[in-house]
């Protein structure tokens, strides 16, 4: 052994050097493990944020080439559906595309999956629908305006969002209706040649005969106007809570106690859609500019809507007509709705429907703060182009919106108020609307509405009476009040 000048041995130095190298390697290995754990943790957090899962939406099969009896009306709608099918594809979402990609990459490592996602995400499609997971996601979606429909599909991991757990079926509805077979009911009958005459009045007796087991052939009738009087409420709870009318009713009650309370909860109106196999509804928007929800109880429906919807889309519908699916920007999207599935559409949203099997659905309409400006735009579009809807504008739409406009300032944001004001500009100023009318004109207008005003009323009193007698005048008066209140707050 050699001795250095400082008295230490070379062997000792070599041992110390080896020990130092080992320690450095351990430190580097520890850093590497920490880095990998951090990467995996970020990957897990990213997956959680994106709500990635392995559930890929599977759309069911159906046959749009249904048999006809040869009548002009049936052949016409068969041709319409065939052309609609050529320009439509099933809805796509980024979540669904991600789930498919994850399924393809399931054998890869987490880092490889993350790297592939980073590349592919830029090429993923925009959402054709907003997929809902639960009631919380429905609430969050209704809190703001949405440009595409909301869709919740019932699966083994996602139970229905419907408000009732009571079993109900087509047979249950038929038994309920059979209590009064002579009651009148409207039906859409596409065997009739003239489209304007296809909605006709009939009786419950004819409806019952359509669904008898022995009636295996016949025109596919659509009963779309059956009010839900079963006392079973199907509307999802979050929709009730987000309805502006519900919020305004709650605001009117300063005392939440039950003692001496005059509060009387009125259930929202719901309607049943009872359809025979192969029935078709051509392109239309729902009436009144409201948000529409539909829940499937039994059977299936194929729901079609344009991929890109703006006010220009609705105007094109007015020009092209309800049986022309061509030339819509981006083509058409379709979704299959099965029992338990929920669909929520924005206001004045064009759509068409095919029923591949006997089906019972339930639905309703409501207004939200985020969509109120769009609802006013939709109402004006229906006023200007009545044929875009398969229903006439009812006075209840004007009265409901008037009531909302008079009270919504306490539950809308400043941005929502500004958007409402911009939509109010579409309607005439009531003062300008009545400025040229004499007292005699006002009295004549009231008499035409079935109101005989007392003699000696002033002009302002006559205008107030007209506002009360005419839903449209009441609505225009509410717009003027909203404008004044908005201007005073600035």
Image: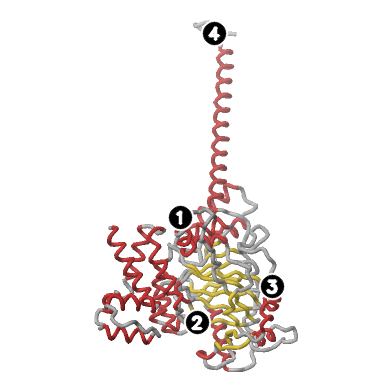
Which label's residue is closer to the chain start, 2 or 1?
1
Helix, strand or loop at disc 4?
A: loop
Q: Provide residue 432's location: percent of width, then percent of height.
A: 26, 77
Q: The N terminus is located in which quarter?
A: top right
- Residue positioned 67% across, 63% down in the render: 165
Circles 4, 1 touching at the beta carbon (< 8 Å): no
Can you tell which of label 3 and label 1 is closer to the viewer? 1
- Residue positioned 60% across, 88% down in the render: 202
Spatial CA span between label 4 and label 3: 95 Å
Spatial CA span between label 2 and label 1: 41 Å
Q: Residue furthest right?
A: 214
Can you tell which of label 2 and label 1 is closer to the viewer? 1
Q: Which residue is mark 3?
A: 169
Can you tell which of label 2 and label 4 is closer to the viewer? 2
Query: Is residue 443 or residue 9 the one in the foreground?
Result: 443
Spatial CA span between label 2 and label 4: 102 Å
For label 2, count other residues whose C-alpha is less than 10 Å away and answer few (under 14), some (14-19) or many (20+): some
Q: Which residue is mark 1?
A: 254
Query: Is residue 143 or residue 23 the one in the foreground?
Result: 143
- Residue positioned 56% across, 65% down in the render: 151
Helix, strand or loop at disc 1?
A: loop
Circles 4, 3 touching at the beta carbon (< 8 Å): no
In the figure, residue 303 lies in which quadrant?
A: bottom right
Helix, strand or loop at disc 3?
A: loop
Q: Is residue 63 above or below residue 259?
A: below
Q: Which residue is mark 2?
A: 390
Which label's residue is closer to the chain start, 4 or 1?
4
Query: Is residue 328 or residue 437 the one in the foreground?
Result: 437
For label 4, count other residues whose C-alpha is less than 10 Å away and answer few (under 14), some (14-19) or many (20+): few
């Amino acid at each position: 052994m050699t001795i250095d000048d400082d008295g230490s041995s070379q062997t000792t130095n070599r041992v110390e050097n080896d020990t130092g190298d080992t320690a450095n390697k351990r430190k580097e290995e520890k850093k590497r493990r920490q880095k990998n754990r951090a990467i995996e943790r970020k990957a897990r957090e990213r997956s959680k944020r994106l709500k990635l899962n392995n559930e890929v939406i599977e759309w069911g099969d159906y046959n749009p080439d249904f048999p006809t009896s040869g009548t002009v009306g049936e052949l016409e709608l068969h041709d319409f559906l065939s052309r609609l099918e050529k320009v439509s594809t099933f809805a796509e979402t980024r979540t669904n595309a991600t789930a498919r990609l994850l399924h393809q990459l399931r054998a890869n490592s987490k880092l490889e999956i993350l790297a592939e996602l980073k590349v592919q995400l830029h090429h993923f499609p925009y959402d054709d629908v907003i997929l809902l997971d639960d009631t919380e996601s429905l609430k969050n979606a209704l809190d703001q305006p949405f440009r595409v429909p909301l869709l919740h599909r019932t699966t083994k991991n996602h139970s229905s969002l419907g408000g009732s757990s009571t079993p109900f079926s087509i047979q249950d509805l038929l038994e309920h209706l059979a209590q009064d077979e002579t009651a009148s009911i409207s039906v859409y009958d596409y065997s009739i040649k003239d489209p304007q005459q296809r909605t006709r009045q009939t009786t419950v007796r004819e409806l019952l005969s359509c669904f008898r087991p022995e009636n295996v052939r016949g025109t596919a009738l659509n009963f779309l106007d059956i009010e839900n009087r079963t006392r079973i409420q199907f509307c999802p709870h979050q929709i009730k809570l987000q309805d502006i009318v519900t919020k305004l009713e709650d605001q009117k009650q300063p005392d939440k106690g039950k003692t001496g309370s005059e509060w009387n909860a009125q259930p929202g109106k719901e309607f049943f859609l009872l359809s025979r196999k192969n029935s078709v509804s051509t392109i239309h928007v729902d009436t009144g500019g409201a948000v529409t929800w539909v829940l499937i109880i039994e059977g299936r429906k194929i729901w079609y809507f344009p991929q890109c919807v703006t006010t220009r889309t609705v105007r094109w519908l007015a020009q092209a007509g309800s049986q022309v699916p061509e030339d819509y920007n981006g083509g058409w999207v379709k979704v299959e709705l099965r029992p338990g599935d929920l669909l929520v559409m924005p206001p004045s949203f064009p759509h068409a429907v095919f029923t591949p099997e006997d089906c019972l659905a339930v639905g309703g309409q409501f207004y939200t703060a985020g969509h109120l400006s769009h609802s006013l735009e939709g109402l004006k579009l229906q006023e200007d182009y009545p044929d875009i809807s398969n229903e006439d504008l009812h006075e209840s739409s004007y009265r409901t919106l008037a009531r909302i406009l008079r009270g919504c300032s306490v539950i809308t944001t400043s941005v929502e108020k500004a958007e409402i004001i911009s939509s109010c500009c579409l309607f005439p100023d009531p003062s300008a609307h009545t400025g040229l009318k004499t007292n005699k004109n006002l009295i004549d207008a009231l008499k035409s509405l079935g109101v005989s005003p007392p003699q000696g009323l002033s002009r302002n009193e006559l205008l107030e009476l007209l506002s009360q007698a005419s839903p449209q005048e009441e609505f225009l008066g509410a717009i003027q009040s909203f404008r004044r209140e908005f201007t005073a707050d600035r």
